[in-house]
Each structure stands twice: as structure tokens, then as C-alpha cells.
Image (cartoon, helix red, strand yellow):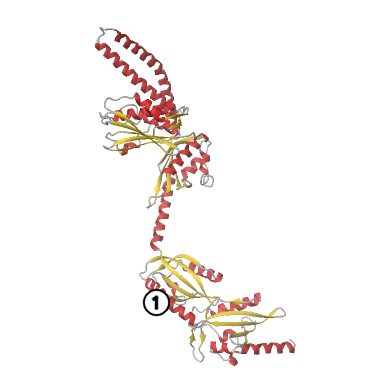
Amino acid sequence: MNTTLIQEQEAMLSIIKSLPGNYLILKPDSPLFTIAEVSEEYNSATLTNREKIIGSGLFEVFPDDPNDPQSDGVANLSASLNRVIATQETHEMPVQRYPVPIPGTPNFIEKFWVPINKPVLVNGEVAYIIHSLTDVTESKQLQSREEYFKALADESPIMIWRSAGPSCIYVNKQWIQTTGISFTDNLGSGHLKAFHPDDRDKVRKAFKEALDANTSYETLFRIIDKAGETRWVFMRATPSSFNGATIEYIGSIIDVTDQEIAAQRLRESEKQFRQLADSIIQMIWVTDAQGMHEYYNKRWYDFTGTTADQTEGEGWNHVFHPEDQERAWKVWRHSLQTGTPYEIEYRLRKYTGEYIWVLGRAAPFYDNSGKIIKWFGTCTDIHEQKLLQQQKDEFINVASHELKTPLTGLMANIQFMEKMLLKKLDAEPLFIKLVNSSLNNVRKLNKLVEELLNANSIGLGQLTIKKEHFDVVALIQEVTAYLNSNNQSIRIKGSSAASVFADPGKIEQVIVNLVNNAYKYAAESAFIDISITESDSEIKVSVTDQGKGIPSEKQKFLFDRYYRAESNNGRYSGMGLGLYICANIIQSHDGCIGVQSKIEAGSTFWFTLPKQAI
């Protein structure tokens, strides 16, 4: 090095010595970092003498406190200086707890600094490192904030802590009361004694990563309280800045033991539910409130041969038989919109490629406010029963048709006999009575055969609907004109005209059935009321009696096949096919059918029809 350069460096060091501020000029001779020059303010702040420290190694003058096992000042500052040498860039350190030796004693005075280490480059090499400090220990702003913060923190019901680097410098009363560890014993790393041993490393790692990145972080872990009990806590910590530099971390801790135990129980309950669901033969599924599937049990995947990705959301639809997709979707959408339980028979494709008949059912699950949040459903294999039912339907269909021809001839013969008897003035009354009785019985038998044919055409998927526009009110007036009852009258209320797009013959069949049922099962009613109401999209027809009502537990079966209601004489009447046929007719029209009934208050059977073609 030439004389001129040496003179320039000596002049620079002399200037720095007299500059205001805490400066230390260090040689880049790691790990010594020899002190080349020092400012007067630095000597004053660190209780040192210039002549005694010039030429000494930095950490000879400023060692860690040997009585403080948590001291990390030497390690942190050494790492920063080496980083400056390696990168040739300035490094600003977060606030450091770096106690200073008290001259002439083995003691140290507590100090907090914000250090900045800046390289001095000569010919592309680090010739010196300027180590500058901001003493934040006695800052009036910091002290004011400290007092205010502590006053608030000690009154807080949550646990609060602060740290300078990894060293704890403060805990509030709530933490002390919860853990039973005194304020002094919490300082440094003492607070870690309250952490559950299995969680300690996890929390320290999370803090170090946040400290290195100068970011907030949050974590869930366990602590041991003063009674020795394990408590779950949720912690969030955020860096705090002073004069543009991060000086500490402030953290809050909330006891979430009850919530975590509840969550664990819920997870265990869900695990048990899945184990139970996977062990039964039925297919089980769960959707959200909008009908998007969230879960299938193992039986579903075994049956369909699909994967979770293939049936996610609406993906399950592709395993439905193409002829059943639209019908199943329509019923499912109705349940989602109204909250009514879902029930339908359809065909699912098995992993073998064969389509199997199943009974699909689902019920809504409500939260505490009465809002639907999930649907729980099942699919039950009914293939064998369905095939047997179809075989029975086919047999009944053939038998009914075979009965139809002789019954028609028998009725014609009896009617002819009746006409002949009526012409004879001396006809035997008993004979006339027997002929009338025979005619009535043949009519009943003919009606039963007709119902069997209708029901079987539904079962075999052969129900024919021929729609046209007509006035349903006019149809009701026409039909009820020939429906007679000795003790009851029919009153038609509501709209005077209402156009629908439907099969008038089939709708007449529904009206006749509902009115005759009211006559039969509510004979004590003085009136049978038929009301017609309209909305923007549909017509609603209701048939109301003032009878004894229907028990609620029986109402859900009324539209089932072969279900027979009890009449006033205590006996079952009919074959239980009338309402089943009515329900299928209305559903084939994209309408709905139902009942409201209350004991001793009467019953209302209703159905809806769309105004326009769908």
C-alpha cells in the first residue's frame, strides 16, 4: 500500500473519530474484527476508552455475559459482519439485546441496540466495516410506549409476550397466572419451560423462520399450566418497528382448549362415521347445501368402480342410466329448492358395465338456525326386487287383460237381463235385487281390473300422457256434476278459469279419485271444497274435507303402491292403487301432489300443474 493511500485512510479514520453518532471502524479480519477507530459517542455509549480498545478484537472488548446462557450477541453480530464481507453489501440488523460490561466489575448493564454494518470498498475489496449503533434502551418514545403497552397488556384477558430477537423481554399477568412462572423466570428463554416438550421445537422453528423473514406468523401448540394440565393455545406474533427498524416481536396467545377438544371430537366422530359408513352394504353419500357431493363411502367406489376425482361435484351423473338422468335431476332439484326429502328409483352403472336398479334417498341436515347445510343420502340395491316386481306387473297386466274381455261380456249380459226384468210387470223382486247386486259387483270388479291395468302400465313405464291446452276449472265443474253423494255437497272456489297444458282424461281421473276418497273417508263432512289457485307458473287444485283427519305417521305412505287407508267402518277399502296412480299421473305432468291433514280437523289433498308446456 503506497504512502498516499495510507495517509488518506488515516485522515478518514480521524474524521470518523470526530463524527457525531455511535461508530466503530472494524477490519474485515474475521473472526477478530480488529477495532481500527471509534467515535467519541460510541465510547460514551458503551462505557469504553478509545486507547484501550483500539487494536483489540471486537469480541474481546464486547463479549457475551458469561452468566446469561441465552446471550446471543456475539453470534448474531459475527454472522452479520461475515455477511457484509461475503456480499459486500450493507446489513441492517433487527434490535439486539447486547449487554455491555461495566468497567472494573464482572457485571454487565442491559442494553438494546439497532446495529447497521456497512462495507468500505477499496479496489473491489472490503477494506473496513463501519459498525454503527442506535441505542434504543433509554429512548423516551420507547419508554412511553412501553408503559402504555404494559398497562394495557396486564389488563388483557389474553396472554401477551414480547421478545428482542429470540429472547423474551416481557410477559403479561395473564401468562404468569396461567403458567405459574414468575416474570423474571420467563425472561430470556425461561418462557419455553411452559411449552409442551413435544411442541417446543416446532414453535421455536416457526419463530426463527418468521424472524429471518421479518414477517408475522401464527401457530397452534400446547402449554402446561400451573396445575400441570395441558392446554391448547393459538399464538400470533407480529414484528414491531422503531425508526424504520424491527426492534422486537409482539405476540398474543389465546386459550383454545375447549375448541380444540371439540374439533378433535368432531374429527374422531367423522372418522367413526367413515368407518361405519364403509362397513355397511348400502352406498352412502353426503353433499353440501347446493347438492355438490363431498363424500362417498367405500361401497360406492366398489360398486361403481369410479375414483373420487371422477365423481367429484356433479361428476356422479355419468354413472346414471341415460334414461334416468333427467328424471333423477328433476326430483333432486325439487328437494334442493324445497327441502323435502329425496326419494327415487333409478339405475346405476356397476363396475361391470351392467345397470342396476337402486333406491336413492336423502334427507337434509340443518344447523342451529334452521338452515340446510348438508344432505345425507343412501343408495340401496333393489335390483332383484325390481325385477320380481316387473315380472309380477307383467303377469298382472296379462291376467287383467284376460279378465277384461269376459267381464265386459258379463256386464253386457247382466245389463240386458236387467232391462228384460224391468219390462216384466210380474218380475220377482228377489230376482231383480239379485240382478242389481250382480251388476254392482261386476262394476266394482271392472273398476279393480281397470286400476290394476293403470298401475301396471305405470310400473312397466307405459303410462301414456297426451297433453293439450284446456280449462281445468271447466273440467272440474263438468266432472263433479255427475259425482253424487247423499249427504255431501261440492263447493268450487277460487279462480273461475285456469288454462293448463295437460292430459284432460288423466286429470279427470285424479279429480274423480280425490273427490270419491273425500266422500268415502269423510262421510261426516257437510261439504267437499275444491279450490283452484294460480301463481305465475302453475295451477294448484285442492280438495278439502272436514273429516276425522289422517294420522301424521300414515300420511307419508298414502301415495305408495298398495297402501290402503282405513274407512269410517274400520275396514280397509280398495286395493291401495288410487292415490298411487294419481301421484304418477301428476308427476308425469311435471307437477307435485301432497296432503295436509290434522286429526279431527279434516284433510286437504292437492296437486299442481304447470300452465305452459315444459
Q: Of residues 16 and 481, which is closer to you in this image?
A: 481
Kindly tell me whether residue 392 is visible in this rendering: no
Residue shown at 45% from the left, 38% from the top: 537
Left or right of 81 on screen, residue 383: left
Query: Hey, what amino acid is under mark 1?
Result: Ser
Q: Of residues 422 and 179, which is closer to you in this image?
A: 422
Q: Position of residue 381 (x, y in %)?
A: 44, 37
Residue shown at 71% from the left, 90% from the top: 7
Residue shown at 57% from the left, 82% from the top: 133
Left or right of 299 on screen, residue 26: right
Q: Position of residue 418 (x, y in %)?
A: 31, 12
Q: Position of residue 114 (x, y in %)?
A: 55, 79
Q: Of residues 496 and 250, which is closer to you in this image?
A: 496
Q: Of residues 453 and 304, which is closer to you in this image?
A: 453
Residue extending farthest to the front is 496
Left or right of 244 on screen, residue 477: left
Examine the rendered structure and indicate whether residue 219 appears above or below residue 121. above
Q: Quadrant of residue 555?
A: top left
Residue shown at 46% from the left, 43% from the top: 299
Examine the rendered structure and indicate whether residue 48 appears above or below residue 355. below
Examine the rendered structure and indicate whether residue 465 appears above or below residue 67. above
Write down the residue under mark 1.
182
The quadrant the N terminus occupies is bottom right
